[in-house]
Image (cartoon, rainbow, N blue to C red):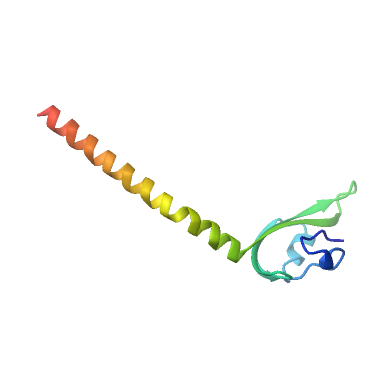
Amino acid sequence: MKAHSSKEEIGKQMVGGDNEAVFAGNSIISETVGSLGPGLRGQTPIYNDAGQVMGVVSVGFLLADIDETIESYRDRIVVVGIVTLLLGVTCTMLLACSAS
């Protein structure tokens, strides 16, 4: 049984073709096309008391959402990087001038 953000998908089999390794007992991260589109997901097996795999936990994000999040932070990261670099160069120059 699966839980899903789309009510029509609840209880249906997972799609994407990346479940075999998880049912074999391995945790994975995969890029695949699921029922909502291309995404990145992490999966890990769930074990019963006898140590047998009885299910899978899967958490995924659509690639479009990942790209949108990266895009929203990119400018801030560049600005922080430039400010840090300028601050480092300025401090280095001040130290070099005071040492001579």
Residue in view at x 87 percent, y 61 percent:
1
Residue in view at x 84 percent, y 63 percent:
10
Kindly indicate the quadrant of the structure image that contains residue 86. top left
Left or right, 44 with reference to 98: right
Residue in view at x 49 percent, y 56 percent:
72
Where residue 21 sits: x, y (%)? 74, 63
Residue 79 to residue 42: above or below: above
Kindly indicate the quadrant of the structure image that contains residue 54. bottom right
Q: Which of these two is toward me, 68 or 13?
A: 68
Kindly indicate the quadrant of the structure image that contains residue 67. bottom right
Where residue 31 sits: x, y (%)? 63, 66
As drawn, the residue found furthest toward the right would be 50
The quarter of the rendered structure image containing the C terminus is top left
Where residue 46 sits: x, y (%)? 81, 52
Q: Which of these two is toward me, 15 or 26?
A: 15
Left or right, 67 with reference to 15: left
**Number of disc labels:** 0
As drawn, the residue found furthest toward the left would be 100
Where residue 68 sits: x, y (%)? 54, 61
Q: Which of these two is toward me, 40 or 74?
A: 74
